Image (tube, rainbow, N blue to C red):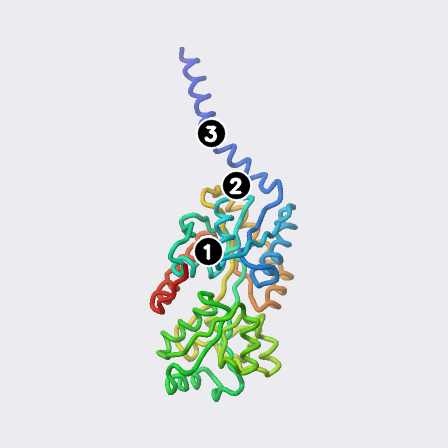
């Protein structure tokens, strides 16, 4: 009887351990097939370009293709719903950016709760925006612009690539922190906004550095400040806006999330792979050419970044009374 009981307990303990062993085995063999990486914006944009760049290195690292799938619509919400609805097996991941923190408040009704329905995996890249002015505007720096705006309330405008974008909210944040009244002029993308800035149809523009740096260096527009907390290598002579408005910061950040329920072992393996490729000097060089820098993070660290940014932009959006259906 004692032997039978001992054998039963041994078998029971083995059975209880099976799920954990099986789970670890799946993580050890991951990925055994291509991984779908859903990007919520159009091909050729900064999100898509960054994903394809990082995806190339991840494919080499893991020995499996990371296939970029652009799913466009509703400020990134269409693609994110598709990604978060996928099986939580690590074979569908989502490209994450500021829109995910912004949309949580900007849209009154979303079919998902990003923080609740996703698992943070890793950070990938951080870059900055730049505030630029038409050469005819009689200001040479941000301090002069703020003084000019205060002397002409409601008569100075700023353009952006669209309502609710991080570029739009850069302006709203400046309005609040500098105490100025400037008028937002939204465009469908930064390219037409830049065209109108050059033509003098708008006075100022918030834009991503990669799209603006050529015109700035050519002297066709005047850079008033970058939105990062410090100066950036791509425009070393342009002050950070925080040098004039202490505490101002509106960096662009990119990362990866997976559907809720994805195992910690797979998340950890993905995170290790991302951080490993971000340490590659060639990848760092390519990111810097795009105006950014690698942003290696732990899953928890990236999750905290998203949560903090969600709270930050919620205050700005509610204060400016911005809403989209």
**Residue furthest to the top:** 1
Residue 303 placement, left or right of 70? left
Dividing the picture into quarters, in which one does residue 312 lie? bottom left
Residue 168 placement, left or right of 29? left
Dividing the picture into quarters, in which one does residue 316 lie? bottom left
Q: Give above or below for 199 relative to 64.
A: below
**Residue furthest to the front:** 325
Q: Earlier in the sequence, mark 3 or mark 2?
A: 3
x, y percentage for residue 147? Answer: 40, 86
Q: CA distance from mark 3 to mark 2?
A: 20 Å
Residue 256 placement, left or right of 172? right
Please say if the residues under marks 3 and 2 sit with CB atoms less than 8 Å apart: no
Closer-to-camera residue (294/150): 150
Residue 17 is marked as 3
x, y percentage for residue 283? Answer: 62, 60
Identify the residue position indicated by label 1 in the image.
Answer: 302
Residue 147 is marked as none
Q: CA distance from mark 1 to mark 3?
A: 31 Å
Closer to the observer: label 1 or label 2?
Answer: 2
Which secondary structure, mark 2? loop
Residue 89 is marked as 2
Closer-to-camera residue (48/270): 48
Please say if the residues under marks 1 and 2 sit with CB atoms less than 8 Å apart: no
Q: Earlier in the sequence, mark 1 or mark 2?
A: 2
């Amino acid at each position: 009887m004692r032997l039978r009981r001992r054998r039963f307990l041994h078998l029971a303990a083995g059975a209880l351990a099976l799920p954990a062993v099986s789970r670890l085995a799946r993580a050890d063999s991951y990925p055994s097939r291509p991984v779908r990486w859903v990007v919520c914006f159009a091909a050729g944009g900064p999100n898509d370009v960054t994903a394809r760049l990082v995806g190339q290195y991840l494919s080499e690292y893991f020995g499996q293709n990371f296939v970029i799938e652009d799913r466009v619509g509703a400020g990134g919400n269409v693609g994110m719903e598709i990604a978060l609805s996928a099986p939580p097996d690590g074979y569908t991941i989502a490209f994450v950016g500021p829109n995910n923190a912004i949309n949580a408040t900007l849209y009154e009704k979303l079919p998902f709760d990003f923080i609740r329905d996703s698992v943070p995996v890793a950070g990938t890249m951080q870059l900055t925006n730049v505030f630029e002015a038409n050469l005819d505007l009689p200001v040479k720096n941000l301090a002069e612009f703020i003084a000019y705006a205060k002397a002409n309330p409601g008569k100075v405008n700023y353009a952006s690539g669209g309502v609710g974008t991080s570029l739009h909210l850069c302006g709203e944040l400046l309005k609040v922190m500098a105490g100025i009244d400037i008028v937002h002029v939204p465009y469908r993308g930064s390219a037409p906004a830049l065209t109108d800035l050059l033509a003098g149809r708008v006075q100022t523009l918030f834009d991503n550095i990669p799209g603006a740096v050529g015109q700035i260096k050519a002297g066709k527009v005047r850079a008033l400040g970058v939105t990062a907390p410090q100066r950036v290598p791509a425009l070393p002579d342009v002050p950070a806006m925080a040098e004039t408005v202490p505490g101002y910061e509106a960096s662009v950040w990119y990362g990866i999330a997976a559907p809720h329920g994805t195992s910690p072992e797979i998340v950890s393996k993905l995170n290790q792979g991302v951080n490993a490729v971000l340490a590659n000097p060639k990848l760092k060089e390519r990111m810097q050419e795009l105006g950014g820098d690698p942003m290696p993070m732990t899953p928890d660290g990236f999750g905290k970044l998203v949560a903090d940014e969600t709270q930050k932009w919620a205050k700005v959006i509610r204060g400016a009374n911005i809403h989209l259906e």
